Amino acid sequence: MTTRGRIPEDVLADIRDRASIVEIVSASVTLRKVGQNHVGLCPFHAEKTPSFSVNDDRGMFHCFGCGAGGNVFSFITKMENLPFPEVVERLAERYGVTLPARVEDPERERRDAQFALNDKAARFFERHLWEGAEAEPARRYLSERGISRATAEQYAIGYAPGGGNVLVRRLREGRHELDEAARLGLIVARTNGSGHYDRFRGRVMFPITNASGRVVGFGSRVVPGTPSDRPDAPKYLNSPETPLYTKGKHLYGLAVARSAMRTAERALVVEGNFDVLALAEAGIEHVVASLGTALTLDQLRVLKRVTPEIVVFFDGDAAGQKAAEKSLPIFLEAGLWGHGAFLPAGDDPDSFVRREGPEAVKSLLEGATSLFDFYLDRAARGATTVPARALVAAHVAELVRKIDDPFAYDMSVRRAAERLGMAEELLRRSAPTGQPAGPRPSAPKGAAGPEELLITEILRQPSLAPRVQDQGAFALFEGEEWRALGERIAERVRTGQPADAAIVLSDLDEELVARITGRLMVDAPDEEANARIVSDCLATLERRARATERREVIRRIRDDDARGNEALVEQGLREHIELRQGKRT
């Protein structure tokens, strides 16, 4: 069953009504009934005391530990890293809901065709590795590197034939568009316009997948001692950037490692594909590779959806320590601490595990150090003069500004001050907010503003929405997302559609949803308290709007005064007085 285009909200509501969120969550989390909710250990972060709560009546979940929250669709999306349409299709089939007829979507059709083309190439490479006579050196090479056939098949490793157009011929036989294959980096157009040739020739092939296991590109390694192993040939070659593959956004082995990561409650990051394979061969399967680049913010955000505990293997030499230090700001920006495990100089995870065995690797991982502490120790050792300590203080202050959690920020400043022998106030003055430099209006931090509080109370009692809208409150909202959400709820109420939170929050930013679900999952205020909250929010919105207008009037008065326009200055002063007295709205 396949559907395309936007799924009508009444269909989503039907699925949500039939799908018990307690039943769905219970397949992954052991829950027990406590009052109106079911509670258990959160599947999205490691914890010993249950802070994960599910409310079947509202069809929502929320973790008061890590802040994750949402409805039955977002739980499966987050748990299994599946795209939203696939989650809807799965639940619809399970609960007998008929989805709308297929809607033509040329862009989606083309993307599906591109994935199918990559999948076809991956199967071709894999089959050639095990069946092709030419691939014998590749099979022997994998065996020499300690990679069994079982592990190779688990990661769908393949072999690209050494001929110049073997894949080109196969794609032509299958009537695939060669131009599309060229856009995906599988083949290359000849400069003289006489056709195409294979990009990958005589190489071991490593499919690169997204979190759902769809092939987005390929990595490869030339086989030593074969005709393809020429001095001018790159040892490693990845797909170029394509409509499906963007360098720095994907991780090798993620689809295979995801389940093991949740079991281990941590992710291990290495640099190379063979590092992943060697560790997996040794039974250490919660491992991914950064595809030959330093870890990026996008890659960390992908990993964070699976586990917040991330360990990176670094070389034990000076270059490795420098790399660990440089990775810290990226971790902090991703909202993660990050840990580093350091290998003996001259080793990589592949050589180390093959020589020392899996227990030695596990021992290194157990001794992994916080990247923040690692940086502080190195900085403290190097700051022996007053100017050097001042530079370190400035750098630490810049780092902690990236920490948006107020408790983590406070703890970090205290720890840094203690390690560096500095006054806390010095660091706090340099980084006063503990917030990221760039604002994020779609997912505000800190105390809830009037928009968030008002929307929460409206979701508790949707009938409030039209009245609030008629009073003009939504027009005073700061942030288009809040305004659109309020108007959307009001419209649903006016037209008799369901306006429960599990449906109307479906399309919003994940962090914003988590904040609202967290407020909705706690005990609701009584009717009097609800009315007081709504009244206070409306008053705050009006005061804020009036203050904004006063600032604008003062700015106009100053501009008119500078131009010598006394009439406009006098008019502006009257407006300002009226605003202060509350006579203007």
Image (tube, rainbow, N blue to C red):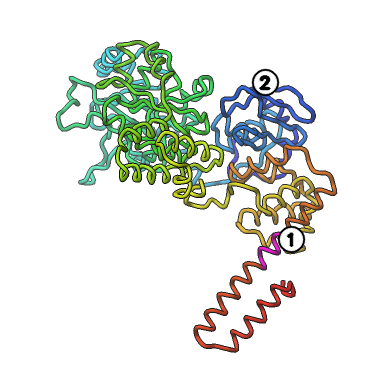
Image location of residue 467, percent across then percent down: 79, 58
Task: Give the mark count.
Answer: 2
Residue position marked by numbered label 2 in the rendering: 30
Q: Judge from the rendering whether residue 325 lies leftward or rightward of residue 103; answer left or right.
A: left
Q: Residue at x 35, y 37 (%)?
A: 326
Question: Eyeballing the image, is 486 above or below 208?
Answer: below
Quarter-wise, where is residue 138 in the image? top left
Q: Judge from the rendering whether residue 274 lies leftward or rightward of residue 40; answer left or right.
A: left
Residue position marked by numbered label 1 in the rendering: 539
Q: How far apart are the alpha carbons under marks 2 and 1?
A: 44 Å
Q: Residue at x 66, y 30 (%)?
A: 93
Q: Does the magenta stretch include residue 544?
A: yes
- Mostly what secondary structure, the magenta segment? helix
Q: How crowded is mark 2: few (under 14 residues within 10 Å), some or many (20 or more)?
A: few
Quick check: marks 2 and 1 in contact, CB under 8 Å?
Answer: no
- Specify which label sits upstream in the sequence, 2 or 1: 2
Q: What element carries label 1?
A: helix
Q: Judge from the rendering whether residue 347 lies leftward or rightward of residue 80; answer left or right.
A: left
Residue type at mark 2: give it: Thr
Q: Can residue 68 be seen in this view?
A: yes
Q: Is residue 110 magenta?
A: no
> From the image, which quarter does the C terminus lie in?
bottom right
Q: Nearer the viewer, mark 2 or mark 1?
A: 1
Per the rendered image, the range of residues in magenta is 540-546
Q: Residues within 10 Å of mark 1 (few under 14, many from 20)?
A: some
Quarter-wise, where is residue 421 in the image? top left
> From the image, which quarter does the N terminus lie in?
top right
Image location of residue 417, percent across then percent down: 44, 38
